[in-house]
Image (spheres, rainbow, N blue to C red):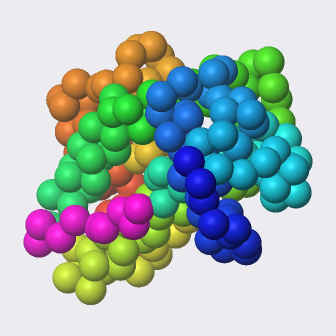
């Protein structure tokens, strides 16, 4: 396929698209710099100048796939919003995009730099922003004290959900567990943040 000479952001986007397609088609284990270069219509040097190792490209490609903004649900209640956001995350984890993330995490056993790069580059910024939005709306509605808008509070539901994946060894958690996370842990924590001894 003849491709005109591309540079800068255009070439970078073509490489990321090609790497994301390779991840989707072959998983991280099957993604090679050669395959990505062929798919992007460029040479390996152009890739290595931007991503010096396969792990960095793999994480960038995953982030490219996952970077679609995650809109915070607005059901009118904190409980409804929290459940909806957990349900979306649960559906994503068992989707093809979730399979790519699970593949990257499994590869991190043999390539420890993958785990570091995942934390640094694909740490869930869009998801964290959605939880902050959800909590801020709850404060505005009078459902939560202002102290509830805190990084640890916002991160807790997803940490618990990830723990469930690890314990169960399956890419989906039953809905009743999501309800327990919200009703038994998240909401009591949120409401208790404004309580002074």
Q: Is residue 163 visible?
A: no
Q: Is residue 44 above or below residue 24?
A: below
Q: Is residue 45 above or below residue 179?
A: below
Residue 34: give x, y in percent of width and height: 74, 34
106 left or right, relative to 128: right
Direction front: furthest residue: 2
Residue 71 covered by magenta stretch? yes
| Residue found at x 65% / y 50% | 41
Residue 138: give x, y in percent of width and height: 26, 75
Q: Is residue 133 above or below residue 181?
A: below
Residue 31: give x, y in percent of width and height: 65, 29
Viewer-side residue, 196 vs 59: 59
| Residue found at x 35% / y 50% | 186
Residue 65 covered by magenta stretch? no
Direction bottom: furthest residue: 140
- The dominant secondary structure in magenta is loop
Quarter occupied by residue 112: top right
Viewer-side residue, 21 vs 176: 21
Residue 83: give x, y in percent of width and height: 22, 49
| Residue found at x 73% / y 72% | 7
Viewer-side residue, 119 vs 3: 3
Instruction: Give the total number of marks visible in the rendering.
Output: 0
Instruction: Please give the range of residues in magenta.
Output: 68-76
| Residue found at x 41% / y 80% | 146
176 left or right, relative to 44: left
Q: Is residue 143 visible?
A: yes
């Amino acid at each position: 396929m003849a491709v005109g000479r591309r540079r800068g952001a255009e070439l970078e986007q073509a490489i990321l698209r090609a790497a994301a397609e390779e991840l989707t088609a072959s998983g991280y284990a099957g993604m090679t710099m050669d395959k990505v270069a062929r798919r992007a219509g460029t040479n390996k040097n152009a890739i290595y100048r931007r991503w010096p190792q396969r792990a960095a490209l793999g994480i960038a490609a995953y982030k490219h796939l996952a970077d679609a903004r995650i809109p915070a649900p607005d059901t009118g209640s904190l409980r409804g919003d929290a459940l909806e956001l957990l349900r979306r995350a649960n559906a994503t984890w068992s989707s093809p995009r979730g399979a790519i993330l699970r593949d990257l995490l499994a590869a991190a056993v043999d390539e420890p730099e993958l785990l570091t790069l995942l934390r640094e580059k694909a740490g869930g910024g869009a998801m964290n922003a959605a939880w902050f939005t959800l909590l801020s709306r709850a404060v505005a509605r009078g459902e939560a004290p202002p102290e509830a808008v805190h990084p640890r509070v916002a991160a807790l539901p997803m940490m618990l959900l990830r723990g469930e994946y690890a314990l169960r060894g399956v890419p989906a958690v039953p809905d009743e567990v999501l309800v327990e996370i919200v009703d038994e842990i998240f909401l009591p924590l949120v409401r208790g943040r404004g309580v002074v001894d």
